[in-house]
Amino acid sequence: MDYYQLTPDVIDEALASVGIYVDRGLMALNSYENRVYRFQSESDGTLVAKFYRPERWSRAQIEQELDFVTAAAEQGVRVAEPLQRDDVRLFELNGLLFSVWRSVPARAFEPDNLEQLEALGEQLARLHGVGETLSLDQRPQMTPKTELVHSRRVLEQQAAIPAALRPRFFAVLDELTQGVIEGYRPGGLIGIHGDCHGGNLLWHQGPWLLDFDDCRKGPAVQDLWMMLSGDRSEQLMQLDTLLAGYENVREFNSAELALIEPLRASRMINYMAWLAARWSDPAFPVAFPWFNTEDYWQRQLGALTEQLQSLSAPPLSLTSWS
């Protein structure tokens, strides 16, 4: 089965192989790393099928993703759960792995809604409580040094970075990378969502966490900082709100606040490299037409330079916040 040629007929065949049938409404959802489709089944209701990108994760790694989600659901965390057929949650047809999930009847999460942020903090604390109990030994650990070395190697191969820009671009990139390596000193690693941003959240009588494709061992703050935006005072207010909910359930190690800017810098660099590495996938030029232009790389240099300044600033602290 060709991952890049997932036609409706191919999707129907895969789902029918495990006794799930598309009756109507097959629609591709916004997902670039994997292929995800929502559809209506007369027997099972609204479902979502997720076809995993080959060679991204091993079978054992995907099974631990599903274990994490299932364990979280059992502890009352609001997560979409995978369907099972004869105690199997990860299916395969012609070498392509896929899973099927219950669709959550919810609306978009509102990151600027403080009530929703506080409720999210509580759900993340419950998730982290589950993450502490799982080994996740097949999943990666959050290690910025290893990730950034790989990202630099990918970016070095980008001929689209203008020649006149390359010396300055890589000088700033290297300085920022060194700052991340020196600043990333986590006190402990637990099972985390890994990619907790507004696109992976929904709201229905509370926040729902979606898409655990990047779950791994990492610091708890990784699941918090991507919800922060705006200037410093706005981020402090958002952080205070998140932690008000979080600490209703689980203690937060405030020393991890010093990891926010290193983690932000790491994500910026890795995101550029991710786009570059996936550019041969036909879905990417369509979805990201602004990538690989001269203007794009000029703006990235400005963003990296600005983040270098943020990295040297005092970390966010709630000590004097009121």
Image (tube, rainbow, N blue to C red):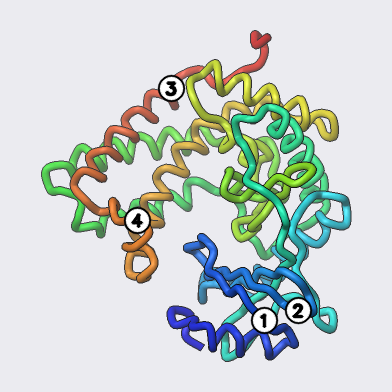
Q: Is the residue marked by circle 1 packed among few (<14), some (14-19), or many (20+) residues within 10 Å?
A: few
Q: CA distance from mark 1 to mark 2?
A: 6 Å
Q: Secondary structure at mark 3?
A: helix
Q: Which residue is mark 3?
A: 312
220 to 45, vertically: above or below: above
Q: CA distance from mark 1 to mark 3?
A: 56 Å
Q: Tell which of 20 and 64 is nearer to you.
A: 20
**Image coords of residue 23 (percent x, y):** 67, 81
Q: Which residue is mark 2?
A: 42
Q: Which quadrant does the C terminus fall into?
A: top right
What's the amino acid at mark 2?
Glu
247 to 36, vertically: above or below: above
**Callouts 1 and 3 close, C-beta under 8 Å:** no
Q: Which of pointers 4 and 3 indicates the residue nearer the eye?
A: 4
Q: Residue furthest right?
A: 75
Q: Earlier in the sequence, mark 1 or mark 2?
A: 1
165 to 280, vertically: above or below: above
Q: Is the residue marked by circle 3 packed among few (<14), some (14-19), or many (20+) residues within 10 Å?
A: few
**Callouts 1 and 2 close, C-beta under 8 Å:** yes
Q: Secondary structure at mark 2?
A: loop
Q: Which residue is mark 4?
A: 288
Q: Earlier in the sequence, mark 2 or mark 4?
A: 2
What's the amino acid at mark 3?
Ser
Q: CA distance from mark 4 to mark 3?
A: 31 Å
Q: Which residue is mark 1?
A: 23
Q: Tell which of 231 and 61 is nearer to you.
A: 231
Q: CA distance from mark 1 to mark 4?
A: 32 Å
Q: Secondary structure at mark 4?
A: loop
Which residue is at a point 55% across and 70% down the rendered structure image? 27
Q: Which of pointers 1 and 4 indicates the residue nearer the eye?
A: 1
Q: Is the residue marked by circle 2 packed among few (<14), some (14-19), or many (20+) residues within 10 Å?
A: few
